[in-house]
Amino acid sequence: MSDLDHRVGVREANLVVRHLKLEKITEENKALILTEIDQTFGIDNVSFDDKSQTLNLAYDATHCDLEGLEEIIRKHGADISHDLWTHFKESYYKFTDKNIKDNAEYQPTCCNNPPPAVKRKLK
């Protein structure tokens, strides 16, 4: 796949897929949550599985992050499940989102000169 296979603002290299179990979901707030998340810049795909009460997300981690999406969920009266497995996944997702964003902002430099301490020893 290429970047052209995704929505505007979503790059293949930064695309992440997340699955979060939610609580306090009703038909009304589910529709509001899905609509607002779908309109967020950087979201590639969003869906909800009624059977498992799981929100499925695909987004570019350089443009949006899990914390911002959780605010949208909480704003509409739902919440992330408080079970151990969901909490573990949520922590891991936040760590990798931050890591992807930090790596995308990093500007690598190349210098063929030895470090200053090494130069002094060579003279």
Image: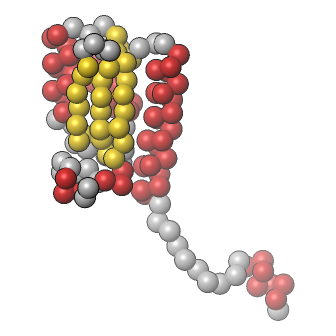
Q: Residue at x 58, y 80 (%)?
A: 111
The image quadrant where one finds the C terminus is: bottom right
Look at the image and name its color scheme. Answer: secondary structure
Q: Is residue 71 visible?
A: no
Numbered-mark total: 0
Up the image or down, 82 lies above or below 11; here it is above
| Residue 77 found in image quarter | top left
Q: Is residue 35 visible?
A: yes
Which residue is more in the foreground, 1 or 37?
1
The image quadrant where one finds the N terminus is: bottom left
Horizontally, residue 13 falls left or right of residue 112, namely left
Residue 3 horizontal/vertical position (percent)? 24, 57
Residue 75 horizontal/vertical position (percent)? 27, 18
| Residue 24 found in image quarter | top left
Which residue is more in the foreground, 44 or 75?
44
Horizontally, residue 21 falls left or right of residue 114, namely left
Residue 56 horizontal/vertical position (percent)? 30, 28
Q: Residue at x 32, y 20 (%)?
A: 54
Q: Residue at x 48, y 27 (%)?
A: 89
Q: Residue at x 46, y 35 (%)?
A: 94
Residue 42 horizontal/vertical position (percent)? 25, 44
Horizontally, residue 32 falls left or right of residue 57, namely left
Q: Residue furthest bottom?
A: 123
Up the image or down, 3 lies above or below 7; here it is below
